Amino acid sequence: MPPKPSTPPKQPMPLMPASARAAVACAAALLLAAAAPAHADGGGSPAWSVAPSTGSGTRPAKDGRPAFYAEGAPGTVLQDTVAVTNPGPKPRTVSLRGADAGADNGKATGAWIRFAQRQVKVPPRTRAEVPFTVTVPEDAVPGDHPGVIVASGGGRTVGVRLHLRVGGSALPALTVERVRIDQDAGRITYDLVNRGNTVLKPKLAVHADGVFGTLLDRPARPLPVELPPGRRVSLSEPWPDVPALDVADVRLTATASGGTRARDTATASARFVPWGAVAGGAAALLAVAGGALHLVRGRRRDARVPEPESGAERERGQGPDAGRELAAAGTGEEL
């Protein structure tokens, strides 16, 4: 029999570089993460949610409302409904409460909110509709009274904004206070205060003049803040190129929609002095002054030293002791 052809030995597969192996492992991890369902509250089930009920309230939206909107006069009772959705396979218990959205001129908007159920148990894959009321007190100040519907359960806390406006005269008022110039930090700090009864979205303009002209001139621009009634917020404006030697007058102008009372201007002044250079110059001046004083005193000492007598003056009796010798002659005193 003819000999069987020998089978060539199998070649070992080339090893994958370490960087390639790491890339494959990373890609596999991403694929597994994408294939796995999302669990937001650590309970192994999709996260529950809370939102305004669709189609109810004073401003319904076709595809859902992002927040609650309510408006009424003092003494009225407003009604709305909050929806709690549980998409998971297990029941979920959620607690509801009202809260204030920041300082509200001392008015506890959250206390005006009452729920038909403070605690609701939502079955799996079910949505529960919970009615609530907002009772506006008789002495409520007209204007905006922001609040929040807060839901808590399963280690999560979710809030939905409540925009409540009490009927009456709107009185927007904005002030700029406590303007300071921080030369070391390179910034201007200030406070904005909403002293009216409406929510304000302020704008700010910055201007600074120095001895030799304009140092800053920033036109009015919207600030990333929303001021409820009674709210004070501390902000700052960057000024990285503060002058080294100058006297600056800074003017901040804050504006908001609503009239002249929603506009205010505040100023501050600062002297920019390079104290390090001033201290060095003063030390040099003191050194020069000290040297000059030493030289003057030396010259004065030299002027008080008598000059030595010459031989001719000594022979003529014109030396410094000549007068004493003449006065003593014939008195019997020893010379």
Image (tube, rainbow, N blue to C red):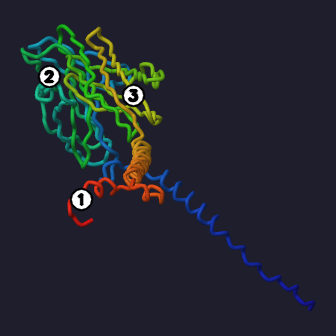
Q: Are marks 2 and 1 in contact (CB under 8 Å)?
A: no
Label 2 and label 1: CA atoms lie apart by 131 Å
Residue farthest right in this picture: 2
Name the residue at 16% across, 32% down. 98
* On-image quarter of the N terminus: bottom right
Q: Amino acid at mark 3?
A: Val
Name the residue at 17% across, 20% down. 79
Q: Which label sits in the foreground, 1 or 3?
A: 1
Q: Amino acid at mark 1?
A: Gly
Which residue bears the numbered disc 2?
134
Q: Position of residue 178 (x, y in %)?
A: 26, 28
Q: Kindly identify which numbered label has been placed on residue 330.
A: 1
Q: Kindly identify which numbered label has been placed on residue 81.
A: none
Quarter of the image for residue 238 reads top left
**Nearest to the observer: residue 104 or residue 24:** 104
Q: Position of residue 31 (x, y in %)?
A: 53, 54
Q: Kindly identify which numbered label has been placed on residue 247.
A: 3
Name the residue at 38% across, 37% down. 183
Q: Position of residue 46 (x, y in %)?
A: 34, 46
* On-image quarter of the C terminus: bottom left
Name the residue at 37% across, 52% down. 304
Q: Which label sits in the foreground, 2 or 1?
A: 1
17 sits left or right of 305 in the view: right
Assess disc 2: are there few (<14), some (14-19) or many (≥20) residues with their C-alpha within 10 Å of its C-alpha.
many
Quarter of the image for residue 168 reads top left
294 sits left or right of 326 in the view: right
Assess disc 3: are there few (<14), some (14-19) or many (≥20) residues with their C-alpha within 10 Å of its C-alpha.
some
Q: Which element carries disc 3, helix, strand or loop?
A: strand
* Mark 2 or mark 1: whose residue is earlier in sequence: 2
297 sits left or right of 177 in the view: right
* Mark 1 or mark 3: whose residue is earlier in sequence: 3
